Image (spheres, grey):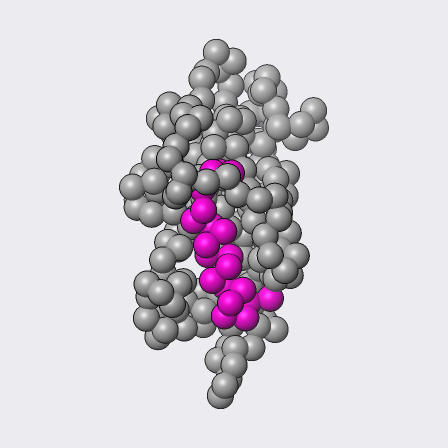
């Protein structure tokens, strides 16, 4: 079961700060002593990310399992190749907040397949299945369309120009999931700058363990 979410239309965004202050008074389970939650935009609507307030709440049963067959569900290293930065929840919240504030140089990507996606995702993310960026499973023209239309890269006569490309923040199910690492390696092979790739290693399991808000995409 996904976390309940408080929605409001973008037309009412001027009231968010006042509402947040009222909500904060009732928050017992905060993210930090100073931070009770953040307000982001998901699918055109404002939504608040915070931790679950029921202190008897248990982790989503879908993420309780501690043993899955490897391969494919193998433990991933702490660092990706070529110096791709590994991030945790604070950094992910910061990227979500910056994107919601209008920073269009950031794109948060859920690399998982449809079945996993329907079990909940991080609000503010978009889904790009890991197979859609691999030359082993996708057409070069389709990958090129994602690069130019979603990532902001520019195709030159022979190479890709990534000067104005977005910073991509990728995640999947957690430390035992290889879908976002597969995406990252595929992007590096094509030439995407490592400095513009971030990996949330904890993924959905780490997010769920902390009781943070999730949504099921439409």
Is 71 left, or right, of 201 in this rendering? Answer: left
Residue at 49 percent across and 46 percent down: it is 171
Residue 129 % position (x, y): 37, 54
State the image quarter where residue 194 is shown. bottom right
Can residue 132 be spotted in the picture? Answer: yes
**Image: magenta residue range:** 174-193
Q: Is residue 39 magenta?
A: no
The residue sitting at the front extreme is: 70
Residue at 41 percent across and 39 percent down: it is 70
Vertical side of 173 occupied by 106: above or below: below
Is 64 left, or right, of 160 in this rendering? Answer: left
Residue at 61 percent across and 24 percent down: it is 30
Secondary structure that dominates the magenta span: helix
* Between 24 and 153, the one nearer to me in the picture: 153
State the image quarter where residue 161 is shown. bottom right
Can residue 215 be spotted in the picture? Answer: no
Vertical side of 178 occupied by 150: above or below: below
Residue 204 % position (x, y): 46, 36
Quarter holding the N terminus?
Answer: top left
């Amino acid at each position: 079961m996904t976390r309940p979410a408080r929605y409001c239309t973008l037309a009412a965004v001027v009231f968010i700060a006042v509402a947040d202050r009222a909500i904060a008074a009732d928050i017992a389970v905060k993210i930090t002593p100073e931070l009770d939650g953040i307000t982001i935009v998901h699918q055109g609507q404002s939504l608040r990310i915070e931790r679950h307030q029921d202190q008897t709440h248990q982790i989503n049963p879908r993420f309780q399992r501690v043993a899955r067959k490897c391969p494919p569900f193998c433990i991933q290293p702490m660092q990706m190749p070529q110096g791709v930065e590994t991030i945790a929840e604070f950094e992910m919240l910061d990227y979500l907040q910056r994107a919601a504030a209008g920073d269009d140089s950031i794109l948060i990507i859920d690399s998982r397949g449809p079945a996993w996606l329907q079990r909940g995702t991080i609000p503010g993310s978009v889904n790009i299945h890991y197979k859609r960026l691999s030359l082993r499973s996708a057409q070069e023209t389709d990958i090129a369309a994602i690069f130019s239309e979603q990532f902001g890269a520019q195709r030159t006569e022979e190479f890709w120009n990534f000067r104005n490309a977005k910073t991509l923040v990728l995640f999947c199910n957690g430390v035992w999931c290889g879908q976002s690492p597969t995406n990252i390696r595929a992007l590096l092979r094509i030439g995407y700058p490592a400095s513009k790739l971030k990996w949330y290693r904890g993924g959905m399991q780490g997010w769920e363990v902390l009781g943070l808000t999730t949504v099921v995409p439409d």
